[in-house]
Amino acid sequence: MPPCMPKTSPPDVLNSAHTAALQAMVGPAGLVLDPAGRAAYEIPARYAPGMAAAVVRPASTAEVSAVVGYCVREGLRFVPQGANTGLAEGSTPDASGHHIVLSLDRLVAPLEVDAADRTATCGAGVRLSALNAALEPHGLFLPIDLGADPTLGGMAATNTGGARFLRYGDMRRHVLGLEVVLPDAAGTVLRLSHGLRKDNAAIALRQLFVGGCGAFGIVTEVTVEVHHRPRQTAAAILVPRDADAVLPLLQAFEAEAGTTLTAFEGMSKAAMERAIAHVPSLANPFAEGIPDYAVLVELTRAWSPRQGEASLDEVLQQIAGDLLEREDGPLVDALFGPVEKMWTLRHSLSEGLRASGPVVGFDLSFRRRDLAAFRRQAIAMLERDFPDFALCDFGHVADGGVHFNLVGSTDPARRETLRHAVLDLAVEGFGASFSGEHGLGRAVQAAYDRYVPRAVQDYSAAVAAVFGQGSASVRLGPA
Amino acid sequence: MPPCMPKTSPPDVLNSAHTAALQAMVGPAGLVLDPAGRAAYEIPARYAPGMAAAVVRPASTAEVSAVVGYCVREGLRFVPQGANTGLAEGSTPDASGHHIVLSLDRLVAPLEVDAADRTATCGAGVRLSALNAALEPHGLFLPIDLGADPTLGGMAATNTGGARFLRYGDMRRHVLGLEVVLPDAAGTVLRLSHGLRKDNAAIALRQLFVGGCGAFGIVTEVTVEVHHRPRQTAAAILVPRDADAVLPLLQAFEAEAGTTLTAFEGMSKAAMERAIAHVPSLANPFAEGIPDYAVLVELTRAWSPRQGEASLDEVLQQIAGDLLEREDGPLVDALFGPVEKMWTLRHSLSEGLRASGPVVGFDLSFRRRDLAAFRRQAIAMLERDFPDFALCDFGHVADGGVHFNLVGSTDPARRETLRHAVLDLAVEGFGASFSGEHGLGRAVQAAYDRYVPRAVQDYSAAVAAVFGQGSASVRLGPA
């Protein structure tokens, strides 16, 4: 084959004995070898497609165990995959064709809701939307708010966060039990707790598998705590005085709204401009021009409006009104309106960005006290060294998360230089995380190798080795 | 020495070279050898005193590292200790005199509050009360509510829960960063994150040390997320229709009070009777006799009362009133009053119990859906097989935690038989935890050996071995 012709067939990783053995374990529907069938499992949500030696789709924990044990014994390496919505290239194979995709998408049972317990138990392949549909009649939901529809197994494996982290936290906070298959020659099945909210009768092994991104084993079943759906919601778009006023504004809302505060999402002018320019359905909510920075704030209450109680809209207007009246206060303007309308701008940011040019994206996370200083220093550096890129950042201010996106040059070397410069400033200058909520995968392997302290890499790899030989999706120890 | 005479001196575990070396590391105030000085470090909060070969009190992380490395190299085993308020015998030495107490009580620096970040960073020896005193001027607190004043290091190492778990969760949820010293020959110091709320850039090694009870290393510094202190509180004592009505009552309050619900504490008639009989300062709040079961419910709000807003007392009365009006509803009576007065009964239960006789205590935790069935079966078993014990249980219903206390016989064999019977029913019959919030230690080592699956024991011990040789306070692997 000429070297420049794209490969459509993987190299001979699987021999006929392998395919026969895997076929016997998972049945005809469980083994996908043809390029067309493989494609959906090979293309990550971002980044270039990889190539799988095969896609294996076990339909039960026993089948996962059989497949994993066989692969380990035969030296076949695999990448676990849920809904393939991850953003760190952790759920797809690389281009080598040497790796099998181990898809959990057929593990859609059980899907059991216990309303009194406020828990649900799901097969790893159950989608977030399916779980929430099952919870809805009970007035419950899993409050991890994302721009995708991942599987519960994938959410646990990557410790998903989202836009309402501020109020509800990440998946780690919700996972009350896990069933995992270890990447060893036996395909050992371990059940790590099973729905207890409090349990200190053994060390918390399951915490390794939450956010472990497949390095410790494959999640096959998840028990999660769920919450009552809010019955009242109010939202507004706030305009802070300047960048330094964002944190005081957040503090004021935390003090005055308490746990009714469920979102506090920062949006830069450039990000808003691109959304308004490129998303046809989005109206510009700002009558007097797009401000330098804005915040989408949301309050919710679990209960229905009570007699004599101010509505949540009124509460929000009262809090904002008091802040607007403060001389030199952190707030200079506020837009109120229906909740969905308020969120539309925030939800359009990613689409607007993608439509406006090639993006260099970062999933950074800071101590929130460092957010303003980092942004200031980063803008100075960008103006000086990278005038060919426009900063279109937005993020989850309350938990320190920043989607620090830059639109500009398509030159790979230039983009790589920019990537290094931003990460050096964030991680080395401010102790930020280079993967706040997207987890580990090939897209951040270079950053992992560069920034995670060598001792942490060594201990992580040694702990993972206790459980088996890991998956091909992430490398914890030094290369 | 005659065998029945209590030993006051440990065997010759430490030679003069050992004491000289340790003295040089921690200074004169840091090494306690005399029995009187050792006593406070040898007596657990419950259970019989142990005996320490010595108490070593390093005053900095560097000193902890030096002491731990030296002990490991010399084969001296040690038990880490914070405020020695633990209830699982995990922080004191056994009676052999072979173990050193490694006290962290001099690690009282730093104590840094960052109000905008809503975090605090504390030396492991900082007491909860000292942290809360430092947070108070900022309107903040660490909302782990306990009947003791532990150190932050001890709280992290045992993953402390408490009476407001329902709203705020356990220490795991609050720990944003740890510094630990590993039990290896170098006394390796590891910093595991440092205050980020979201960080998936590496696997969560620090989660092993939270609730690790010293098996993985010694916590020397903790960064925690803290919260705004509530500015409104209301409480009531509720009388459910019967035992089966407790969970529906909780569900109703979760739905109607949302995140303002901060405590939902169940109290049995026998526990309340003993408190009222034995705690002189406590008045009987029940005009018409003590009910079979009662619930202390608390609501809080972060904000000050707003104009036109119903007071929190009114909200609580409205929710309870609506439930009282329901025919065959879960609630049959409700007592309202000042918050402190409402809590007095709940806070007197332990004292009343201790004053009424020798207690066999359990720190159980259930899926909350199993609470009523377990209690019913346990009562039947106790009436049949253990009529010489009275059940005086109380607990944190919303998170499934039950302090299942029995008062009766002092005969050790009889108490041991009872202990086995209750644990068999709870753990084997209902999948409960035998240590919901007190962690691991000698008091639960037998239960650990009996009930924790062998595979989990093996993996736990293998993971701990990655970090060093562990402490003498807990054994994770099979004996």
Image (spheres, coloured by chain):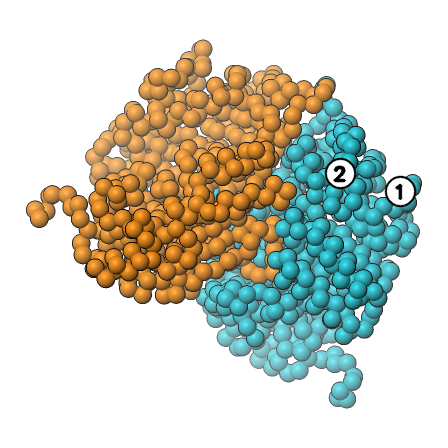
Chain colours: A cyan, B orange
Q: Is residue B25 visible?
A: yes
Q: Position of residue B439 (x, y in %)?
A: 40, 45
In the picture, measured across the screen, residue B427 lies left or right of residue B204, that is left
Q: Which residue sits at x=65%, y=25%? A: B304
Q: Secondary structure at mark 2?
A: loop
Residue A2 lies in quadrant: bottom right
The three-letter code of the residue at mark 1 reads Phe
Residue A330: numbered disc: 2
Asked where in the image residue B200 lies, by quadrant, the reply is bottom right
User: Of residues B315 and B35, which is closer to you in this image?
Assistant: B35
Question: Residue A141 location, x and y as percent?
Answer: 66, 41
Q: Position of residue B9 (x, y in %)?
A: 17, 48
Residue at mark 1: A286
> Which residue shows up at 64% across the image and 57% down it?
A430
The answer to whether B402 is drawn above or below residue A210 in the figure is above
Residue A467 in sight from this viewpoint: no
Report the side of A344 relative to B324 (left or right): right
Mark 1, secondary structure of its residue: loop
Is residue B54 left or right of A321 when viewed as pictured? Answer: left
